[in-house]
Every structure is written in C-alpha cells, then in structure tokens.
Image (tube, grey):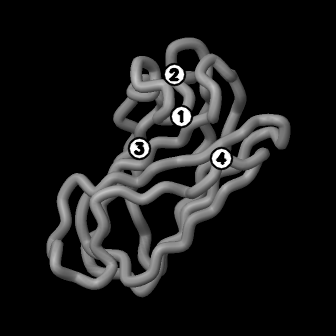
Amino acid sequence: ITGKWSGVSAGGCPNHPATYPNNPMYQFRVEQDLVALRVELKAPKEVQIGFEILCVEAKNTEAKGYFSKKGSGSYRSGYVVLELENFVAGVYNLIPSTFYAGVEAPYFLNIYAPTALKVNRLK
C-alpha cells in the first residue's frame, strides 16, 4: 500500500491526542487463525515512523495470540517491522504514523500473511 501523511492526515504519534486520530487508517479481515503475520512500514529515513494495530473484533479472545492493541515499538528512522505469531482471526485496524504531528512524508505499508488479505483504507 502506498500512502502519504499530508496536511490534516499528518497526525503524529499517540503522544498527540488531538491530532493522532487524523492519521490514515486501514482495516483488514483475517478469516482464519494464522501461524504468523508481518507488517512493515517504510518512509524516508529522516522521518521517525511507527504504527499501531487495533483489534476491532476477534473470533477467539481466549486464544494464545489474542491482543487488543499492539505497536511497532519505538519510532524509528524510515523503517519499522512487527511480526506477530499465532495471529487470531478477526478484524483489525492499522494506523501508521510519524512521531511528530505535522510531518509530511510518503510511506509504503506491507502486510505479509500466508493467505490473501483484503485491506481497505478507512480514512
């Protein structure tokens, strides 16, 4: 997925609660539990980036791999990756962001899974 943080959509990280909700948001559905799922976010190396994955609906909240929210960790220059094992079937929202609000930059978002996923941009 190719996107860009620009104008209002350059909301920054969760430390900026007034603007963070303006970041781009993608939603995808996983029909069956997966052994693993990998998400990569790339941007120009001078831009500090990260993302969050939020579980909207899970088929089994008791499963070993269930989570309500996961982040890519510390914001990094130009590249972050998150690998999740025992990924639980359900609906998820993914929010890529820059560390600082107002930083405009293009990005590439890749989601690797053993089965095809349909990803929709919500905003």
Structural distance between the alpha carbons of marks 3 and 1: 16 Å
Q: Which mark is residue 26?
A: 3
Coordinates of residue 17 in the picture (x, y in percent): 41, 25
Residue beneath the point at 49% across and 25% down: 16
| Circle 3: residue type | Tyr
Is residue 88 shown above or below 54? below
| Circle 1: residue type | Cys
Residue at mark 2? 9
Q: Residue furthest top?
A: 7
| Circle 2: residue type | Ser
**Within 10 Å of the Cα at label 1, are there few (<14), some (14-19), or many (20+) other Cα atoms?**
many
Q: Earlier in the sequence, mark 3 or mark 2?
A: 2
**Residue nearest the viewer, comparing 78 with 120:** 78
Quadrant of the image for the C terminus?
Answer: top left
Cβ atoms under marks 3 and 2 closer than 8 Å: no
Q: Earlier in the sequence, mark 2 or mark 4?
A: 2
**Within 10 Å of the Cα at label 2, are there few (<14), some (14-19), or many (20+) other Cα atoms?**
many
Q: Which mark is residue 13?
A: 1
Residue at mark 4? 75
Structural distance between the alpha carbons of marks 3 and 2: 13 Å
Mark 4 falls on what kind of element? loop
**Residue nearest the viewer, comparing 53 with 106:** 53
Q: Earlier in the sequence, mark 3 or mark 1?
A: 1
Mark whose residue sits in front, 1 or 2: 1
Q: Earlier in the sequence, mark 4 or mark 3?
A: 3
Residue beneath the point at 41% across and 44% down: 26
Mark whose residue sits in front, 3 or 2: 2
Coordinates of residue 59 in the picture (x, y in percent): 15, 72
Q: Earlier in the sequence, mark 1 or mark 4?
A: 1
